[in-house]
Image (spheres, coloured by chain):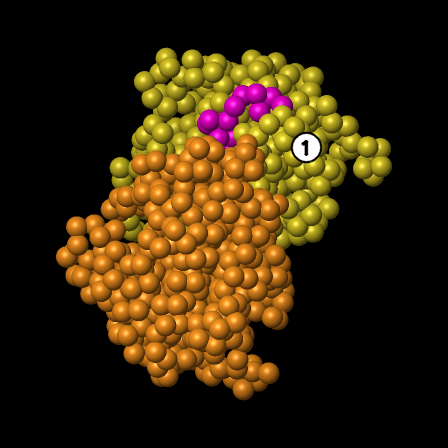
Chain colours: A orange, B yellow
């Protein structure tokens, strides 16, 4: 691990032309906040839809590193965002552990088999063995890194263990995730066993991503907001901590959607950046997180359906409310039907913003 | 209105044998908290499923007052809850306004036509004209009231205007409600027009429910948590206020699921009870709401999948954390696959609880 701190990647170092995102993530003083969008790779870009049409399905696309890398770089070319995020899916982890999924067009993921008890948890593979099946992601990162050629940093990511458990137990998206949440009451020990297997795999997976060139790792806890606070503390935070502690040499972001009640717990994790959804006021988050972290977010993605004036005003107001130590993003992944013109206005508004001298310490 | 304050109902007054729920809602000192469950009528009771099997679909059932009344009373007979809630659906309001819906089994509501612009809002009926089509609900309340014969109070309800707008624009449930949320950015004036029409109808509808015997009115803002705070303040709270002010003579509860960020706004409404979801810690809510309201909630419905010991411990702990001025409920409607045994343990735990003398002021 000590060696990784100095040479975390097997990618030859190329000086970054735009390192604004990394400087901001480290808490350095910057001239304006960096900007990127969750789900910027794919969905909204016509170039993506054109590329994607060459593949029979989503998974075939994800498993083709050259295609995934092209989708990764497209928003840098087309939108001028300050970071790229590797095109992939959080569900590659359960698949690598032995629980296959299908991506149903316009509906979302569906798992033909789900976790139903001790035997199905026992049968899962984990750790290096499972993460070894994810070479296609590491290769997508390597190809992306070469294609970016130092233009902007590259973000790697994984689902947080609770969110991955939620899919593995529920078998797909759900209005309530009541099966997954119910397991925490009906068989907490089994839930912990499953969470540990997911965590072991995720650590190996993210170490592989760092080796392949990821400059920052984001953990997506998409279903954090489904848990009561005491369960988030017992079943989510300890595994986030294990992951964060296992990756000391790379910058890390946790985005726990809906987990406003856990901000004080998240603030204690050894990560640099806390992502926020669009419900969470900047002042509320800062008061709970303290001064030691950078905050990322959190414009309502629906704002991008508004007029240019609406988007500019809301984006500037958000930047003012956050103040320094802020990375601009939406409060959720950009929605597929968002007008590209609205996305451009959002990105350009941030690019043109300059912190007032007094806003900097 | 002055007359309503003294004679709100056209139902002959019958002395309540169990008025614990109303005493608690008024903020009076009580020996234990009352208990009922959102969605207690229907879903979980075998008696309901038997009754429901006689009807071709959900809507035919809802529109048959005798059947709806039987479903209303069943949980009082079977579970011993401290209040009944009329069996109905929040979507009867958009239907009465001219926007028909279908209830798709196991999937939820679907609107063949949705609100798409000014013409479709203009075409909606509202106020007394629309509410006049809801006689079947008033009749269900009257029949329920007679059948209850003073055993417990009867709760009436409606959807909050923002939540009704969300269904009318979105056309059904949604993972993101991005169309409805988007309207607030793309055409805020039209959104306000639609919200006003829904509000006018809801006021007439709830006055009809009070006339028909409802002892307390609950407003369900199921999709409150989808809005950023400034939009909840602009597009939800003012309409809740109009409704609450139009019903001065009856006790009122607002349950705004996910609206932790708006508790201070909700605290200023002229309602007696604030409902809480299972994410919101009692102390957090009390600090924001102040001492002037009763809090209702908020056990995680998934707790009822747990063992008897788990349910008893969690229920007692919840009651201790809330302290006085509390009505026990789940933090969400009871889920359809909840074991009836778990529901019984929950209700009985509350029935056997007694506040310590020191917990009362």
Q: Is residue B341 magenta?
A: yes
Percent across and percent down for residue B36 are 60, 27
Residue at 72 percent of width and 23 percent of height: B352
**Percent position of residue B285, x then y:** 65, 48
Q: In this orientation, which residue lies closer to the viewer: B110 or A24? A: A24
SS at badge 1: helix
Residue placed most toward the observer, A216 or B197: A216
Magenta segment boundaries in residue numbering: B332-345
How would you rate the neighbour count of disc 1 (Cα within 10 Å): few for under 14, some for 14-19, many for 20 or more? few
Q: Position of residue B111 (x, y in %)?
A: 30, 37
Q: Is residue B156 left or right of residue B62?
A: right
Residue A303 place in picture, x, y as percent: 39, 62
Relative vertical location of residue A184 with respect to residue B260 in this rendering, above or below? above
User: Residue at the bottom extreme?
Assistant: A357
Residue B351 visible in the shown view: yes
Please give the chain letter of the residue carrying mark 1: B
């Amino acid at each position: 691990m000590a060696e990784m701190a100095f040479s975390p990647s097997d990618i030859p170092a190329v000086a970054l032309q735009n390192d604004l995102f990394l400087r901001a993530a480290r808490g350095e003083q910057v001239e304006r906040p960096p900007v990127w969008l969750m789900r910027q790779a794919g969905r909204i870009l016509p170039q993506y839809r054109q590329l994607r049409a060459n593949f029979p399905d989503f998974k075939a696309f994800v498993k083709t590193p050259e295609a995934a890398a092209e989708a990764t770089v497209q928003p840098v070319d087309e939108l001028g965002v300050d970071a790229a995020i590797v095109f992939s899916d959080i569900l590659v982890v359960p698949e690598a552990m032995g629980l296959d999924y299908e991506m149903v067009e316009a509906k979302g993921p569906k798992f033909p088999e789900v976790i139903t008890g001790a035997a199905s948890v026992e049968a899962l593979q984990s750790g290096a063995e499972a993460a070894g099946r994810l070479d296609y992601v590491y290769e997508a990162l390597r190809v992306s890194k070469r294609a970016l050629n130092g233009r902007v940093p590259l973000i790697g990511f994984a689902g947080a263990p609770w969110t991955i458990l939620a899919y593995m137990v529920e078998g797909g998206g759900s209005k309530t995730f009541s099966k997954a949440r119910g397991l925490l009451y009906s068989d907490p020990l089994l839930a912990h066993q499953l969470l540990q297997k997911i965590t072991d795999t995720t650590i190996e997976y993210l170490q592989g991503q760092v080796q392949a060139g990821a400059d920052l790792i984001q953990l997506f806890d998409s279903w954090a907001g489904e848990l009561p606070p005491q369960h988030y503390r017992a079943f989510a935070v300890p595994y986030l901590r294990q992951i964060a502690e296992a990756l000391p040499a790379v910058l890390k972001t946790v985005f726990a959607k809906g987990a406003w009640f856990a901000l004080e717990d998240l603030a204690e994790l050894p990560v640099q950046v806390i992502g926020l959804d669009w419900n969470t006021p900047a002042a509320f988050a800062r008061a709970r997180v303290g001064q030691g972290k950078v905050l990322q977010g959190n414009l309502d993605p629906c704002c991008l359906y508004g007029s240019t004036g609406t988007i500019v005003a809301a984006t500037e107001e958000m930047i003012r409310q956050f103040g320094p130590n802020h990375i601009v993003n939406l409060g959720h992944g950009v929605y597929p039907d968002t007008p590209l013109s609205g996305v451009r206005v959002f990105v350009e508004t941030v690019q043109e913003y300059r912190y007032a001298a007094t806003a900097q310490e």
